[in-house]
Image: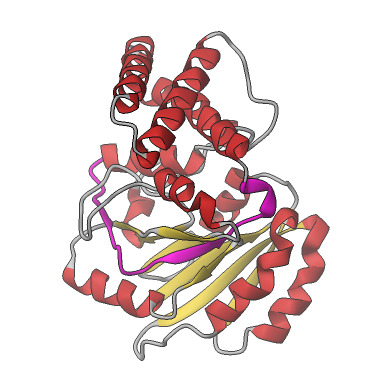
């Protein structure tokens, strides 16, 4: 089996690069899987190819230079790279993560026992202040192993060569400043009958930047989720997107209020998150745009 795994290397996460590379180098091997790594590197940090050459010895790898500081654009470079390649699966992990030792081994077991075109896995978090553990936990989707889902994030996923039969296979660069390109990419495939399943055993761990251990960062992140959610719904439901967005705003505000009446710490956190997402959606309808990607 041939697998290509892509990582986009960005300037903001260079402090975590060594951790990522060491986890890739030390992955538990599977005899009949040929894993090749593809590093898509921003121009400003192209010199990091030297660290890759120093640390990656067990796997073949390719380096692609990205001329734009733009996540969807860089992911599309990888898709373009794959078009003429012979492979079974390919996928993405993020450059601020490190992979569990059994990541590849468990992905292989999942591929052998489940029929699907796309596999997503969980992202755990490595943080310094334990106060924020439940905040990070509430950001992540609550899914069961082998569950069929509508979309997965590109921080931990594999996809079959079959998805290249889809006529417009690309990440939408209109999301470059707001996030959500991966959600739209995979949700669009799901709507076109490509089966996506959740593999809870193959997880990655996100290294957390200190600036994210801040309540206001979580509120801003959820506000951005609300705004990008509008963009996704507008593309998926072009004729009725106003109705869809209005119903989601109503649901998020209602759920936010209901949770307050059951005031556990987790419920209060979720209430804040849903309220922030509703505000992001309302602001989007009023043509407000977030100033930067959060």
Q: Residue at x 62, y 51 (%)?
A: 74
Residue 105 location, quadrant: bottom left
Q: Residue 225 in the image: x percent, y percent?
A: 49, 32
- Magenta stretch: residue 212 in it? yes
Q: Quadrant of the C terminus?
A: top right
- Please tell me which residue lies in front, 1 or 197: 197
Q: Is residue 168 visible?
A: no
Q: Is residue 177 visible?
A: yes
The answer to whether 37 is drawn above or below residue 170 in the figure is below
Q: Residue 90 in the image: x percent, y percent?
A: 43, 65
The answer to whether 238 is drawn above or below residue 15 in the figure is above
Q: Residue at x 34, y 61 (%)?
A: 160
The answer to whether 99 is drawn above or below residue 71 in the figure is below
Q: Residue 183 in the image: x percent, y percent?
A: 42, 40
Q: Quadrant of the N terminus?
A: bottom left
- Magenta stretch: residue 53 in it? no
Q: Residue at x 58, y 44 (%)?
A: 72
Count of marks overlaid on the render: 0
Which segment did they paint magenta? 192-213
Q: Is residue 286 left or right of residue 275?
A: right
Q: Residue at x 50, y 11 (%)?
A: 285
């Amino acid at each position: 089996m041939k697998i290509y795994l892509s990582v986009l290397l960005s300037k903001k996460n260079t402090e975590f690069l060594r951790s990522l590379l060491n986890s890739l180098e030390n992955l538990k091997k599977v005899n009949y899987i040929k894993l090749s790594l593809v590093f898509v590197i921003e121009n400003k940090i192209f010199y990091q190819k030297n660290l890759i050459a120093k640390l990656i010895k067990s796997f073949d790898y390719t380096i692609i230079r990205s001329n734009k500081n733009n996540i969807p654009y860089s992911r599309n470079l990888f898709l373009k790279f794959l078009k003429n390649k012979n492979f079974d699966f390919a996928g993405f992990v993020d450059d601020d993560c490190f992979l569990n030792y059994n990541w590849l081994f468990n992905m292989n077991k999942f591929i052998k026992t489940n029929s699907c075109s796309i596999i997503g896995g969980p992202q755990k978090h490595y943080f310094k202040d334990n106060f924020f553990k439940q905040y990070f936990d509430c950001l992540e989707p609550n899914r069961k192993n082998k569950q069929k889902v509508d979309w997965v994030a590109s921080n931990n996923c594999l996809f079959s060569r079959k998805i290249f039969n889809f006529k417009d296979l690309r990440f939408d660069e209109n999301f470059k400043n707001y996030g959500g390109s991966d959600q739209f990419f995979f949700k669009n495939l799901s709507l076109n009958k490509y089966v996506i399943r959740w593999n809870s055993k193959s997880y990655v761990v996100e290294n957390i930047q200190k600036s994210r251990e801040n309540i206001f960062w979580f509120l801003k992140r959820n506000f951005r989720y609300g705004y990008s959610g509008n963009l996704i719904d507008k593309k998926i439901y072009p004729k009725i997107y106003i109705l869809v967005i209005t119903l989601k705003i109503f649901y998020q505000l209602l759920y936010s209020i209901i949770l307050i009446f059951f005031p556990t710490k987790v419920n209060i956190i979720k209430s804040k998150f849903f309220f922030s997402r509703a505000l992001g959606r309302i602001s989007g309808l009023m043509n407000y745009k977030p100033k930067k990607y959060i």
